[in-house]
Amino acid sequence: MLVVEVKGQWNSELFTAAQLQLADRYAVHPTAEEQGVYLVLWFGADEKIAGLKNHENLQASDLKKNLEEGLPIELVGKVDVVVLDLSRR
């Protein structure tokens, strides 16, 4: 089984959901083997990030890097972070 947690970039739990929801609640299912995908929907730099204005003008790739760097070491290799760029450029 593949478990996926999906969040919009504006979600206030954006930086905690990979661990607190995906890993702690869903990936513990016996057939998930403690693995999953954290899918973040990116709608552009003009949208809020985790409920806050994007003062740093982050882009989708920046957010992916920040989310990956924020994963606890025990989740590295178990949780794949995917930022799906849905912005209109």
Image (cartoon, rainbow, N blue to C red):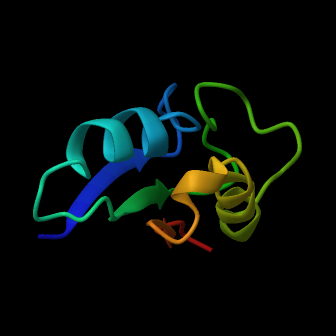
Where is residue 69? Give x, y as percent. Answer: 74, 56
Residues 20 and 89: in front is 20
Position of the N terminus, as image quadrant, is bottom left
Where is residue 56? Give x, y as percent. Answer: 89, 44
Residue 7's place in the image compared with 32, above or below, is: above
| Left or right: where 87 falls relative to 27 | right
Residues 43 and 7: in front is 7
- Looking at the image, which residue is at 19% across and 69% down? 2
- The total number of labels drawn is 0
- Looking at the image, which residue is at 66% across and 60% down? 68
| Left or right: where 73 falls relative to 36 | right
Figure quadrant of residue 61: bottom right
Figure quadrant of residue 25: top left
| Left or right: where 46 falls relative to 14 | right
| Left or right: where 31 falls relative to 72 | left
- Looking at the image, which residue is at 54% across and 69% down? 88
Position of the C terminus, as image quadrant, is bottom right
Where is residue 35? Give x, y as percent. Answer: 33, 64
**Which residue reaches farthest right?**
56
Where is residue 37? Give x, y as percent. Answer: 36, 65
Figure quadrant of residue 87: bottom right
- Looking at the image, which residue is at 53% across and 33% down? 16
